[in-house]
Amino acid sequence: MARPQQSYNKKENEKKRQKKREEKNKRKEARRSKAKEGGGGIPFAYVDQYGNLTDTPQDQTEKEEIDASSIELGIPKKEHTEEDFDPVRKGKVSFFDHSKGFGFIIEEGTQEKYFCHVSGLIDEINENDSVSFELEKGPRGMNAVKVTLLK
């Protein structure tokens, strides 16, 4: 049975595909032969005492001995004393809307502004009142709670 005639474009496209396959195989063989010689691959790198990558090994005479038991894994625990952390903070009411039931308090020392809701009030407050409060994590940041009026 005779093979059907192929158009000129089909023959040319097939020749191009064949040529690409041959070039790809040549490159593949070249990489393999280079890897066997040891010339290919990733170059070797060293790390110096400061954590920088270098191409020369570190001098062993400069090496410092470290006792493995002195290495602390994780975050070091802080020693808390009662005088270090006082949960009660002082501030001034910068804004409070009684109809909407919320406002803002500015802390004295840091000038940080904290949201305050009517549900977190112990005493009734107005703008420019001096207050003491505690902080609690809310959905949008820190909220002032247990707000009491200072005399």
Image (tube, helix red, strand yellow):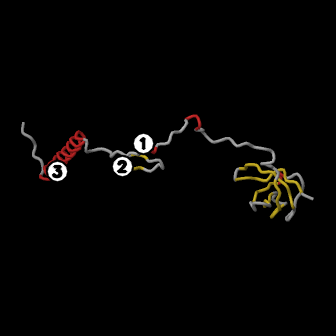
Q: Nearer the N terminus, badge 1 or badge 2? A: 2
For discs 1 and 2, the disc positioned in front in the rendered view: 1
Which residue was labeled with disc 3?
A: 16
Point out the image quarter for the N terminus: top left
Q: Is residue 104 visible?
A: no
Neighbourhood count class around disc 1 (C-alpha, 10 Å): few under 14, some 14–19, many 20 upward: few
Q: Secondary structure at mark 1?
A: helix
Residue 143's disc is: none
Between residue 109 and residue 69, name the one nearer to us. Answer: 69
For discs 1 and 3, the disc positioned in front in the rendered view: 1
Between the residue at mark 1 and the residue at mark 3, the CA separation in whole angstroms equals: 57 Å
Q: Secondary structure at mark 3?
A: helix
Furthest-front residue in view? 61
Which residue was labeled with disc 1?
A: 60
- Residue placed at 79% from the left, 59% from the top? 107
Neighbourhood count class around disc 3 (C-alpha, 10 Å): few under 14, some 14–19, many 20 upward: few
Q: Nearer the N terminus, badge 2 or badge 3? A: 3
Q: Secondary structure at mark 2?
A: loop
Residue 111 locus on image (x, y percent): 75, 62
Between residue 102 and residue 64, name the one nearer to us. Answer: 64
Residue 126 locus on image (x, y percent): 87, 62
Which residue was labeled with disc 2?
A: 55
Identity, as a three-letter code, of the amino acid under mark 2: Asp
